[in-house]
Image: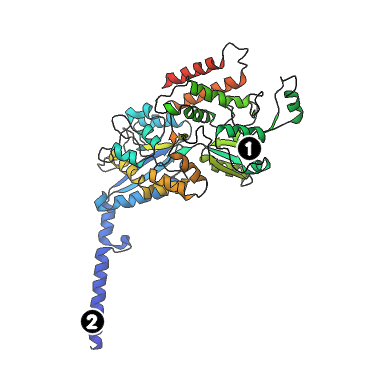
Amino acid sequence: MTKPKIILISFILLFLLFIAWFVISCPPLKKCPFSKKQTENQPKVTLNFVGPFDTQRDWQEVFDKFNAYKKLEQNGFLDVTIDYKALSGNYQNEVKELQYDEKGPNIFMLFNSWLPEYQEDLLPAPEEMATLAQFKNTFVRVAVDDFTTSDGKIYSLPLYVDTLALFYNEDMFLQAGYTKPPENWDEFKNYVEKLSRFNEEEKNIATGINNTNIKQLEIAGAAFGGGWNVNRSQDILMLLVIQNNLNKNDERPLSFTNAGSTNAIKYYTSFTDPSKRYYTWDKDWMYSIDAFTQNKAAMMINYTRMIENIEEKTQGEINYKIAPVPQLDENNKVNYAEYWAPVVPAKAPCVTKEKIDCYSLAWEFLSFAAKEENAKLYLDETNRPSAILQLAQEQRDKNDGARSIFASQVLTTKSWVHPDSERSDQILVDMIDYLTTKNLDTGELTINEVIENYGNKIKSLQ
């Protein structure tokens, strides 16, 4: 073959390759005339998404992936922007105000106990998106309890569920001769007794003939038993209440005045009683988080979000570990759930010049985000335990630190009906403070009567 022919054939092949490249992909797209025209004509839409804690960064990978998915012609050919904003101030009031003014948001995070209060203002998932049976097979049981209704409607596809776990100071444990955390509440009392430290002079007076003086704490065995100065004391109390109502956990709402609930409340508040061998807390002691981070409390019970708080306060100078929360019955574990889940309000105009069904688009995003490969992006960024069964089991079995501990508890979490969580929280804390500061023996009310009175206040909110 002559050289001119070789050159001609080479030119023809290169020309054909160029045509193929242009037709098939033409990267970068902005240099392709037909692609540029398509991009310019692509409908644009913005969904507004608000919540109390997360950031745009926490969701960004999921947002970007959803936008890439929707840009494809077979998936709607839309350019979708999702703006996430954490609201400051009173979150509930701000969300309601935005809804009533019909200014969005298109998606907002709902606390796991609020559905009864918000249900009329929310849109359930389209029936073709998921059945109740599919939801039960995909998500943990507490999500079924909190975000589905008896008529089979689904109001959220939660990505995570947080649980209460035991934080403990490993150095203090080793000094006391403990190499592992307590697994049940009887062990917990014994650990508290040994880990607590008091001013020796005050201790001798308090344990002598004149037993009216209160022991002066130096180190608390646990940040446990108090009300206002124990972070999330109301949740710790309700964990005990639910565990003590093991055979009645399917009752919604939960009774506060039965024997199980009363015993749980008495157990919790007894840690502030100086006459108890495991006395460890009082109303004048420092706030629980400060006590733990300043090596003034050997244990506390809290959520995953507290990890970041501890790290910020201590800069790695405290040697602590996390363990499953103690149980009443190791063969029937019960854990306490607290989490936020995305929902779609009924009044949510989106930002667009096109005729787009914002509500369907918002639900399409929630469904997309709840797919395992997409949910992982959010869960890895926030380091939270998954509400999706398969992912929760993977996190548990991974044994990669704190998240595995929290994930191991997700499958046995329970919740309770308290749609007005702000008021119920205050009632529970007030009850704890009343029981731990009043001398009930000389007062007008017995401890059972106090519990009944506050229990009736909670009942009125349910």
Could you say where residue 316 lies in the image, as x and y percent from the top left?
61, 47
Q: Name the mark on residue 8.
A: 2
Residue 57 visible in the current orientation = no
Could you say where residue 266 lies in the image, as x and y percent from the top left?
56, 23
The one nearer the camera, 123 or 224, is: 224
Extreme residue in the top direction: 444
Q: Residue at x 72, y 20 (%)?
A: 211
Q: Residue at x 26, y 79 (%)?
A: 10
Residue at the spot of label 1: 298
Q: Name the mark on residue 410.
A: none
Q: Amino acid at mark 1?
A: Ala
Classify 401 as above or below 98.
below
Q: Amino acid at mark 2?
A: Leu
Q: Residue at x 41, y 38 (%)?
A: 50
Q: Is disc 1 surrounded by few (<14), some (14 to 19) or many (20+) residues within 10 Å?
A: many
Helix, strand, or loop for circle 1? Answer: loop
Image quadrant in which the C terminus is located: top left
Could you say where residue 298 lies in the image, as x and y percent from the top left?
63, 37
Extreme residue in the right direction: 201
The one nearer the camera, 89 or 193, is: 193
Classify 29 as above or below 419.
below
Could you say where residue 57 lies in the image, as x and y percent from the top left?
45, 47
In-image side of 190 versus 13 (left or right): right
In-image side of 126 versus 340 (left or right): left
| Displayed quadrant of residue 6 | bottom left
In-image side of 391 versus 172 (left or right): left
